Amino acid sequence: MTFPRAAIFLLVSFLVSCSNPPSETRPIGEAYVGPATLLLRQELTPKAAVSATVKHGEKLQILEYKRRFVKVRTAQGAEGWTDNRQLLTPEQMAGLRRMAESASQITSQGAASTYEPLNMHTEPNRGSPSFWQIPDTARVDVIGHKLSPRAQAPQATAPVVRQPPKPPRRKSKEKAAQSKFAPPPLPPAPKPPDNWLELSVPREDGSEEIKPAAPKSEQKAAEPVPMDDWNLVRTKDGKVGWVLMRALSMAIPDEVAQYAEGHRITSYFALGHFEGGDSDKNDWLWTTITKGLEPYEFDSFRVFVWSRKHHRYETAYIERKVVGHYPVQVDNSGAVPKFSLILEGDGGQLIRKTYTFEGYRVRMVNKEPYQVSKPAEPPSQTVAVPAQPAPKERSWFARMKDSVRRLFH
C-alpha cells in the first residue's frame, strides 16, 4: 500500500525541519571589549553563571538591549550579558588605536614607576574602561598630561544600541472630547484690602512711600569642581593609556631627586656623561611643579652637574616662576648638548627657548614663537552623489495642455 503524495510531502518536510538547527539571533550592532578581562553572564544577575571570558579589544555582536545592559555574542558563538559601560563603540576603539599609533612617535618625558599595580584607562576619567594593569615592578614612559574634572560616579559611555522610541499613547475618547472645548474663564482678580490707604505713608513732597522689598536670600557660591592630574603613558610593548599622575614616581636617581624640596618632578633628561676617576655620572635637566592641578606641566626647570670636588650634584642653572608645557626636547648628538622648552610669554603666547649646556655654563641661544600642531583630521566619509541629468525641454503641446488645465482648476 502506497502513501498519498501529500502524506509523503509532509513527512519529508518534518524530517528536514528536525535535522536543521534553530537559526541564530540576528545581531543589531557591534562593540569591542573595554577592560582587560570581562565576564559574560548567562542571566541579568550578578551571581549568574559565567558563559564566557573575553579580553580587551575583542569584537562582540550586540543581540539585545535592556536598560544599560546588553546581550552579546563572541566570535566563538558564546552569548552572555554585560554592562554597557564596559564596552567600546567602533569609533572609540578606532580612536584608541589611532592614539597608540600617534603616541609611538612622541618623545618620552622620562621613565616612571608605580608603587602598586596601576590601571590604564582609555580616557582621563575614573569612569572610563581600564584595559590594562601596570605591574608594580614595571616602568612606563610619560608622554603627556591633562587636567580633567573628577567624576563623582562612573560615567556611562554612549549606548551601543539605543532602544527604539516608544509609540505615543492614544488619548481616550473622553479626553479627546474634553480637549475640543475651551477652558473655563479665569476668576476675577482679588480686591485690594480695606486699609490700603493706611499702608501708604505720605512723604513731605506729597509722594507715597513704598516700602522696599525684603532682600532675597543670597545664593550659595558654587563649589569648585574637584580636578585630577592625569598622565598619558606608554608601556614597553607599545600600549598607551591614561593613569593618575599622583600614582607615578619619576625614576630619576635618588641622589638627584633629593633636591626636589617637596615639588613634583614632571620630566627629566640626561645631559652629557662624565667619566673620571671613580665617578661615572650624568648631568641632568629636570622640570618640576609646585602644587599640581594646573593646566600646564611645570613652573621651574633646573640643570644639575656633578661636582668632582664635593662628590655631589650641584645646581648649574635654574629658572623659577615660569609656565611651561610639554614636550621638553634634548639633543645630545652634537659636541655641545642642547635642550629646548616651551614657555608662556607676556600675553599668554607660547615661545620655544633653546639653551646650550657646555661644562658648567647654560646659555640661551634661540627664542622663537611656538604653534601647537593640530592632529590631522580623518577623511570625511561622504558619499559621492551622481550628477542628475538636466531636465528635458517640454513640447509646445504639453505646455499648452498645462495652461488649459490651470484655467479650469
Image: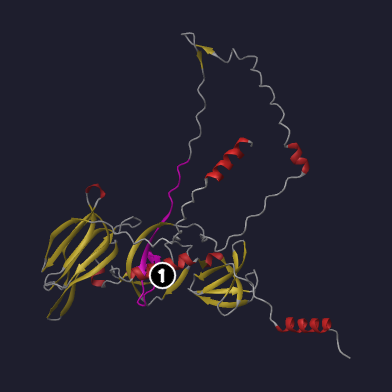
Picture quadrant where residue 171 is located: top right
Please state which of residues 118 and 82 is positioned toward the viewer in this rendering.
82
Residue 144 located within the stretch drawn in magenta:
no
Q: Can residue 121 be seen in the rendering of this structure?
A: no
Picture quadrant where residue 368 is located: bottom left
Outermost residue toward the right in this view: 1
* Residue drawn at point x = 63 percent, y = 14 percent: 195
Q: In x, y percent, where is residue 224?
A: 43, 49
Q: Is 249 drawn above or below residue 218 in the view shown?
A: below
Q: Is 409 drawn above or below residue 122 in the view shown?
A: above
Q: In x, y percent, where is residue 314?
A: 16, 67
Callout 1 amino acid: Arg
Q: In x, y percent, where is residue 324?
A: 26, 57
Q: Can residue 308 be seen in the rendering of this structure?
A: yes
Q: In x, y percent, where is residue 174?
A: 78, 41
Please state which of residues 197 and 366 is positioned toward the viewer in this rendering.
366
* Residue drawn at point x = 51 percent, y = 58 percent: 153
User: For the N terminus, which image quadrant?
Assistant: bottom right
Outermost residue toward the bottom in this view: 1
Residue 226 located within the stretch drawn in magenta:
yes
Picture quadrant where residue 264 is located: bottom left
Residue tagged by mark 1? 97
* Residue drawn at point x = 53 percent, y = 13 percent: 201
From which residue to which does the magenta span run? 220-249
